[in-house]
Amino acid sequence: MSFRQDRTNPASAVSNWKGRTSTPKAHPSTAISTWLNSVMFAGASRPSWFAHWQGNADADITGSLGHGLDTSDNIYVLARYGSGYFGIAKIDGGDTPTLLAASNRSTSVDWDQVWDIAPRESDDQIAVTGLWSSGYKEAVYMFDAPTTSTIADPDGPRKYYQHTGNANAAQFKEGRHMQARKTAAGNSTKWDIAWGEKNAWGQAQWFALTFENYSSWGTAFYGDAGAEFIRDNVYHEGVDRQYITGMHDSYSRWRAYGYTIASGSSTRRRADFQNSSASMSTRGGYIVPAPAVGADEFGYFMGVDQLSANNKLHVARIDCVDNASTDMAIVWARTLTPGTGYTGDGYNLDYPAGAPYCNPVADSEGNVYVAFSWYYSSGAYVSISRYDVDGTFNWSNILKVTTSGGSVASDTYAHNMSINSNDDIVISGKTNMGSSAGAGAAGWVARLANDGSGTGSPITLSGGSSPGGTVHYYDNKTNMTSASGDLVVSGNSTHDANYSANPTYSDTGVGWAAYPITAIHGSPLV
Amino acid sequence: MSFLCYRDPDGNWPRYPQDVKDHSPDWVKGQDLPEGWAEIVQTAPVPDPVDMTFVEDEVGPNGENVRFATEFKGYRLEVAWNDSENRWEATPVLNETAVEYPEPVPREWFINGEWTTDPVGASG
């Protein structure tokens, strides 16, 4: 239960309210007793913190850094470093981030990208996905969960696979997502994975499958062949439903997929999202499920409009994403843009093209968090914002890293966001706080209070090969503009799933060297 | 013909159920709309876009493939009142848009006290 601070601390001055449209702000439709949570009446919110780490002999973190949580809120992080090595680490996700265990480092420089990591507790396994650079094959490793400070080398070979329908030049280059699927009882039993595939003719399609272990791979299926050009596939499994999102070939519309697998159904429901001018979008497109709030079952859509210099982030609450027989519908939509007066530390935020952003995520009360990264000529930083379940813009903070020399770190990107069992935000990515190329490249993960607190004085970082960097976490809401969104579901349709019978799998071995991540440097955000 | 969204009393669209509820907290979806609000009906599916022009692919910061559109020819929705049907309708109309991006900003690295756009082995 959240205390609805927005209802007692409205974002706009009362003197600016319009009589017709703003009157409801002064007359909340629910009793105050239903707003309360621990934030103001039952104790302080949990402390926020920022932690970073570097490789061992290879200090330069060079790849996307996803993370996964177990049910004890431990954080498993994934790092690509050097020229294609990777390793994983387990971090205590409590109030003080500490390194619990780390793996060796792969010896072959063959990971073009590392994407996601997901622990599965039913059998204490951890799966990692990435792109094997030889032939651009999707690859998976499975580790045993650590019982000591060492995460053992994978007990099986790398599994990689390629869709033989485009055997000559299938390239798994666009998008990624993986999660350990949880049953209703809360145990993870399988992994789900989705990605985009571009073939030799420049066509692409989405592709997804479920697997349990090296020898048990579920039926693979893929989206409409030919016309699709997918980015940032997301594949989420709810209690009995699945969600897939992807980009349309033309970049002009998002296509979002929700379909059921219950009772053997293979029918999925597709919705096309666009704005009124049809001028969207170059990146993104996510639908994520939200926990049930009362009788409502819904999800959130997020995407970015980048076909003009006036970049916008769209977020919308979507009903009926769970039902193959019902159209998707927008409950509310918001457009988030930098305010006209925003000059954020001298950086122009009008041009996030190229800036990756991470998945949205909903907490247990249905509040949704969106994050993306702004970058500019010499710096990049992360914007994190929250809307409540009714679409009220609650807060918007900036997470920024500066080097020991005072420059904005060149490489601060958010890759992955999740919510732990206490409704804290966990977000991870990479940064570069060094004064020389590569020397200060680091992975980072932050645990942030969901009420947006923790903004305050900058923190000087210690540890690593380039200590002295500074983390700034500050309130940026007044510099952002949130308006009723320019987003519609322009088409709903039903599609039969296009099940594939011919993905091929291969196994290969790989070496491991003793270069584990040796330290996590955590600092509280106050 | 299918429901697309709402139009508010000031003529703004798209608007959604939550916007109506924010305006009239007692309103429940399915009831008659408050005064001044109206439904907008979509008259036809939005066709697939006709054409786009792209600049060359780039590799994004996370290694993803990135393309930038420079010209877009597709369909946008236009809303107008239909007297004979007595309703607001959204109709797809062809739209050509030149997309203007700011000049690409070169990636820079701070090496040995100086910024450079060409770091040798900067990222490993």
Image (spheres, coloured by chain):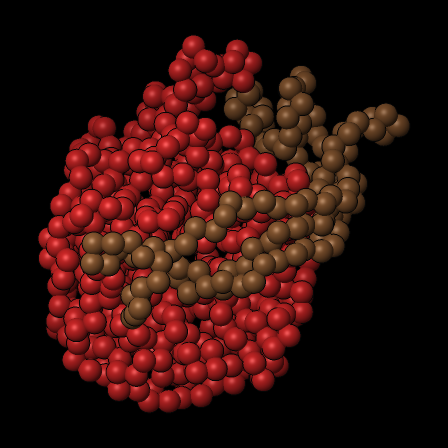
Chain colours: A red, B brown
Quadrant including the C terminus of chain A = top left
Q: Name the residue nearer the viewer: A274 or A365.
A: A274
Vertical placement of residue A160 versus A73, above or below: below
- Residue at 74 percent across and 54 percent down: it is B50
Looking at the image, residue A498 sits to the left or right of residue B81; the answer is left
Looking at the image, residue A287 sits to the left or right of residue A464; the answer is right
Residue A134, located in which quarter of the rendered image?
bottom left
Observer able to see residue A522: yes
Vertical placement of residue B58 versus A165, above or below: above
Measured from the top left, where is residue A498 in percent x and y?
64, 71
Residue A185, located in which quarter of the rendered image?
bottom left
Q: Name the residue nearer the viewer: B34 or B123.
A: B123
- Residue at 44 percent across and 68 percent down: it is A192
Vertical placement of residue A138 versus A407, above or below: below
Looking at the image, residue A145 sits to the left or right of residue A185; the answer is left
Q: Name the residue nearer the viewer: A152 or B103.
A: B103
- Residue at 63 percent across and 64 percent down: it is A228
Looking at the image, residue A325 sits to the left or right of residue A294; the answer is right
Measured from the top left, where is residue A30 in percent x and y?
42, 24
Observer able to see residue A363: no
- Count of picture labels: 0
Q: Name the residue nearer the viewer: A220 or A42.
A: A220
Vertical placement of residue B101 versus A116, above or below: above
Measured from the top left, where is residue A365 in percent x and y?
38, 40
